[in-house]
Amino acid sequence: MHFTDHLSRTIFLSKPPERIISLVPSQTELLVDLGLEEKIVGVTKFCVHPSRLRKSKKIIGGTKNYRLEVIDALKPDLIIGNKEENDQTGIESLAENYPVWMSDIFDFKDSLRIISDIGEITGTQSQATEIISKIESSFAKTIPFKGTCVYLIWENPKMAAGKNTFIDAMLSVAGFKNLIQAVRYPELSEEMLVKLNPDYLLLSSEPFPFKEKHQNTFRKLLPKSKIQLVDGELFSWYGSRLLHASDYFKRL
């Protein structure tokens, strides 16, 4: 069976995979929700959902640095990664020996696509269709506009989510207008933040774990803005994590 990934790469599988390694936390969660937990043999140290996996599965390293000897010992028949989250050199090295399927996610539609694609690859199409249906149903009603925002992902230096990111797409779905027009994750100075003067400054829980102390600091800098701590997983994780996103966005 031939499968084409999001980077237009083709992999061949002689049968449905039985020994899967996931290199991305959100995709690991998706595999579990598709009923494939027993077929997962390796995960990264950042694969925190469900939490039991890091005890029951082999840790193959991080999302960018891999313990190749561990991967070789696991003898995977499928490795699943992501263009943004994984290291290109490491992926190319793994692809020399194993089928490596890569996702590339920019928006809500891409996130639904990966659920369908991985369902097809793993023979769990019916479970994938059910998850997609539930997600689409939860987002069927447009969330009212909340206001303008800046979404920070890092503190020092200050970095924001800009255009051409999944976070930017989810901000729009959640009812925000992202004021950052630069692509990817530009650095921002305090002066730039003050000039932007967003209705909301959203402080993500990941990759930098913003806390209440940061919230208080930004209140002094932006007294007219609403400074809010937000769950970064629900803005940046794609796949089945979207099952929980709509209700959260409505509550914000």
Image (tube, rainbow, N blue to C red):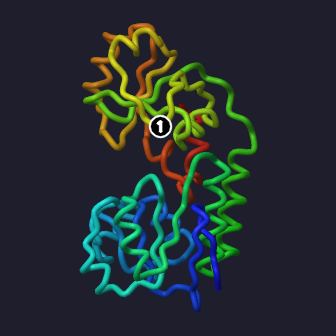
Where does the image place residue 106, in percent across and percent down from the top left? Answer: 58, 47
Q: Nearer the viewer, residue 23 or 29?
A: 23
Residue at the spot 38% in from the left edge and 80% down from the top edge = 41
Tell me if residue 114 comes above or below residue 184 in the rendering.
below
Residue 156 x, y percent position in the rendering: 25, 30
Q: Quadrant of residue 54?
A: bottom left
- Label 1 sits on a secondary structure element that is loop
> In the shown orientation, is residue 5 left or right of residue 139?
left
Quadrant of the rendered image containing residue 58: bottom left
Q: Position of residue 220 (x, y in %)?
A: 31, 10
Task: Tell me the crowding category of disc 1: few under 14, some 14 to 19, or many 20 or more residues within 10 angstroms, Cα based.
Answer: some
Relative to the observer, which residue lies in front, 228 or 186? Answer: 186
Q: What amino acid does circle 1 point to?
A: Arg
> Is 198 on the left or on the right of 43, as rendered?
right
- In this view, 168 is above or below 79: above
The residue that appears at 33% across and 34% down in the rendered structure is 154
Residue beneath disc 1: 184
Residue 76 sits above or below residue 159 on the image: below
Number of marks in the rendered image:
1
User: Which residue lies at the image location 36% right of the left edge and 42% below the top edge?
Assistant: 206
Spot occupied by residue 72 in the image (x, y as percentages of width and height):
31, 84
Q: Residue furthest bottom?
A: 14
- Position of residue 191 relative to residue 81, above or below, is above
Task: Out of 208 and 250, give the one closest to the viewer.
Answer: 208
Q: Quadrant of the N terminus?
A: bottom right
Viewer-closest of 119 and 248: 119
* Residue pictured at 59% horizontal, 42% vertical: 247
